[in-house]
């Protein structure tokens, strides 16, 4: 199963946060093994922004942390025009641009989305969500 991790799921998975549920951890691990685990490039922007604002910290630079994530086997998906347009066209979806781009990435890849965001989990759009808390 192809999986796109949202920003929180990525952090939980790579920082060993116990908030990541066992079932979600197994799904992510299997996707990495199968070579079908992905992250939107926008997630690294979101993390860098949180770090700059002092809302989040890492034991290493965000550049080094990103390289570690990519070496582990998560594939970074660039935000291109197709994803940008698809993000804008999501129906009955909130206005957060990061969430829109992450969801559009999952839809484009035909992937499930690992997330703990209640708004994403409740959305009735064309993406299957994996509750990252379970």
Image (cartoon, helix red, strand yellow):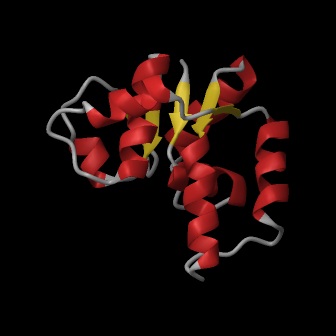
Q: Quadrant of residue 75?
A: top right
Q: Is residue 80 above or below residue 96?
A: above
Along the viewing direction, whichever of 104 and 111 lies nearer the viewer: 104
Q: Is residue 112 visible?
A: no
Residue name at image x 47 percent, y 27 percent: 81
The mark tally for this picture is 0
Residue at horizontal 83%, vertical 48%? 68
Residue at (54, 18) in percent of width and height: 1
Nearer to me, 132 or 76: 76
Question: Which residue is drawn at the image coordinates 85% and 38% (left, top)?
Answer: 71
Q: Residue furthest front?
A: 81
Q: Position of residue 129 (x, y in %)?
A: 37, 34
The answer to whether residue 81 is left or right of residue 95 is: right
- In the image, is 60 to the left or to the right of 28? right
Location of residue 80 in the rendering, given as x and y in whole percent from the top left corner: 53, 29
* x and y, in percent, of residue 16 in the image: 69, 59
Residue most toward the left?
Answer: 92
Any part of residue 59 in sight: yes
Q: Is residue 108 above or below residue 16?
A: above
| Residue 117 percent coordinates (x, y) | 35, 53
């Amino acid at each position: 199963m192809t999986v796109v991790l949202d920003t929180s799921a990525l952090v939980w998975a790579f920082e060993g946060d116990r908030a990541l549920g066992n079932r979600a951890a197994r799904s992510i691990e299997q996707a990495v093994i199968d070579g079908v685990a992905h992250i939107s490039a926008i997630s690294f922007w979101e993390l860098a922004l949180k770090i700059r604002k002092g809302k989040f910290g890492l034991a290493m630079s965000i550049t080094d942390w990103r390289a570690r994530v990519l070496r582990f086997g998560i594939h970074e998906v660039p935000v291109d025009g197709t994803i940008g347009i698809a993000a804008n066209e999501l129906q009955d979806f909130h206005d957060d641009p990061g969430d829109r781009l992450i969801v559009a990435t999952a839809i484009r890849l035909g992937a499930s989305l690992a997330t703990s965001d209640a708004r994403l989990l409740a959305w009735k759009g064309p993406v299957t969500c994996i509750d990252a808390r379970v």
